[in-house]
């Protein structure tokens, strides 16, 4: 199964319930090993194969070989053209010659292909599931042309092969490059198997309750995890999670323009993974989770992140993340609002939301007192936003169907509040 399709299927299956299965094509797994040397044109124009460490018997003439007991060493040679000639001399079928030569050339070029691959930097922010390096793609295109020309020279025909460039643009290849090829192949098959199984299972029955759906999803993930543990060591499984888990994908996409170090990402991942696991556990119980309870849990998670990163670094992290995700970025460009002013607005919003949460959860206040306090808090925060953003940008933002102020102290009818996007409503989480 094509690894890109498997990768997409895996992400759709793990991050959410997917609507369908993309077209999947088949191809042979990558070879397990490749020779150290690589086929290339030498100055004389001859094409040489990777070195085979042949014994002297491998250098005998074909006539001598026929006169004695046949051995494959008598056919092999480090010169590709002689190798093809020897195969034809023993009346090897052309189709078999083609299969042998293509497999051999594939092995020879595999080392060069792998040498051009870059380790996947799982701690780098990304909106997609893989990053494409144009220079690397061009190198692979050139390598593919060279490989195709070599096969045409040896076999006399154009051979259709999977594009080396497309293979290395495959994010799953890149993400799993820390594993031996055999384990990559086994994981690819496992991802495909459970992707299809999950699609079929989740769509086979109608009318499930939310609790039943979560329990079924959780059961499938546990089954898959148990199978993965048979393939990977505990350390490899941890590295897999940092690259391929829903938590890691969500974390990378939330970083915005913030650049983490590898260790920072590992620390952030551990904290976020604990929160995600707790959320999944609560969802599987079928108990309704109060919105304020969830925000308190998110606030606790953010406080742990702040303690881990330090306040200054944490503030940079929050600012860059929010800047990349907020609709205010577009407004700032339209109304020429400096980025620093927008970051001040983020801080005001964060402080307001935290204060509103304290008011709503304060059991010493009556409902009337809470409403009065929240109304006052909203008025203060709106005036503060108008001051840092400017009247025009603030008015444009306020015309949104659901600005975040409505989460502090609602003034619009509920139907009107829920009609529009919630991009800026809650920013306590990732």
Image: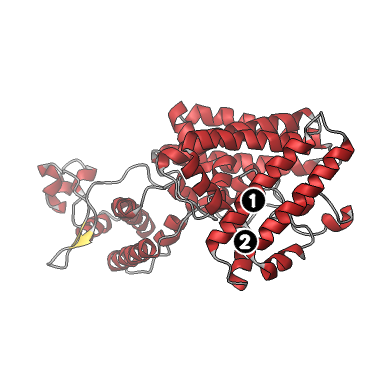
Q: Residue at x 54, y 65 (%)?
A: 338
Q: Secondary structure at mark 2?
A: helix
Please give the residue where the numbered disc 1 appears in the rendered image: 348
Report if residue 210 is visible in the image. Answer: yes
Q: Residue at x 72, y 57 (%)?
A: 382
Question: Tag 1: Cα neighbours inside 10 Å, few (<14), some, or many (≥20)?
Answer: some
Left/right placement of residue 68 relative to residue 176 reads left
Labels 2 and 1 touching (C-beta < 8 A): yes
Quadrant for residue 344, please give it: bottom right
Q: Position of residue 287 (x, y in %)?
A: 81, 30
> Image height check: is 395 above or below 429?
below
Q: Position of residue 111 (x, y in %)?
A: 29, 50
Q: Give the mark nearest the N terminus, 2 or 1.
A: 1
Q: Secondary structure at mark 1?
A: helix
Q: Position of residue 347 (x, y in %)?
A: 60, 50
Q: Position of residue 31 (x, y in %)?
A: 38, 46
Instruction: Tell which of 330 and 185 is nearer to you.
Output: 330
Instruction: Tell which of 165 and 331 is nearer to you.
Output: 331
Q: Quadrant of the C terminus?
A: top right
Report if residue 16 is visible in the image. Answer: no
Task: Give the number of the disc on residue 202.
Answer: none
Left/right placement of residue 405 relative to residue 150 reads right
> Image height check: is 70 above or below 138?
above
Quadrant for residue 273, please give it: top right
Q: CA distance from mark 2 to mark 1?
A: 10 Å
> Image height check: is 301 above or below 344?
above
Q: Report how many numbered discs are placed on residues in the image.
A: 2
Please give the residue where the numbered disc 2 appears in the rendered image: 388
């Amino acid at each position: 199964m094509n690894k890109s399709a498997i990768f997409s299927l895996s992400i759709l299956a793990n991050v959410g319930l997917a609507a369908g299965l993309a077209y999947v094509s088949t191809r042979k797994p990558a070879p397990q090993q490749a020779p150290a040397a690589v086929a290339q044109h030498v100055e004389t124009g001859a094409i040489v194969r990777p070195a085979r460490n042949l014994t002297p018997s491998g250098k005998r003439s074909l006539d001598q070989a026929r006169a004695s007991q046949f051995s494959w060493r008598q056919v092999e040679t480090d010169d590709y053209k002689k190798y093809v000639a020897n195969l034809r001399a023993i009346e090897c079928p052309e189709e078999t010659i083609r299969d042998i030569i293509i497999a051999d050339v594939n092995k020879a070029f595999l080392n060069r292909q792998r040498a051009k691959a870059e380790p996947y930097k799982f701690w780098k922010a990304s909106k997609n599931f893989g990053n494409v390096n144009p220079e690397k793609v061009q190198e692979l295109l050139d390598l593919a042309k060279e490989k195709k020309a070599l096969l045409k020279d040896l076999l006399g025909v154009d051979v259709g092969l999977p594009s080396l460039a497309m293979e290395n643009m495959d994010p799953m290849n890149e993400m799993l490059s820390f594993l031996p090829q055999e384990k990559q192949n086994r994981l690819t098959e496992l991802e495909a198997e459970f992707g299809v199984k999950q699609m079929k299972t989740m769509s086979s029955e109608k009318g499930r309750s939310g609790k039943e759906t979560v329990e079924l999803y959780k059961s499938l993930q546990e089954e898959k995890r148990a199978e993965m543990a048979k393939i990977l060591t505990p350390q490899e499984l941890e590295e897999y999670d940092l690259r391929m888990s829903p938590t890691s994908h969500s974390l990378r996409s939330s970083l915005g323009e913030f650049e983490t170090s590898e260790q920072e990402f590992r620390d952030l991942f551990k904290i976020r993974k604990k929160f995600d696991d707790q959320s999944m556990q609560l969802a599987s119980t079928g108990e309704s989770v109060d919105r304020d309870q969830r925000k308190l849990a998110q606030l606790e998670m953010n406080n742990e992140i702040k303690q881990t990163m330090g306040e200054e670094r944490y503030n940079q992290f929050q600012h860059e993340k929010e800047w990349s995700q907020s609709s205010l970025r577009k407004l700032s460009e339209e109304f020429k609002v400096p980025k620093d002013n927008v970051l001040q607005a983020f801080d005001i919003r964060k402080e307001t939301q935290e204060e509103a949460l304290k008011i709503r959860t304060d059991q010493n206040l009556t409902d009337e007192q809470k409403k009065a306090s929240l109304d006052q808090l909203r008025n203060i925060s709106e005036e503060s936003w108008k001051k840092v953003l400017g009247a025009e940008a603030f008015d444009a933002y306020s015309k949104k169907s659901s600005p975040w102020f409505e989460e502090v102290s609602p003034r619009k009818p509920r139907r009107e509040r829920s009609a529009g996007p919630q991009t800026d409503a809650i920013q306590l989480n990732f």
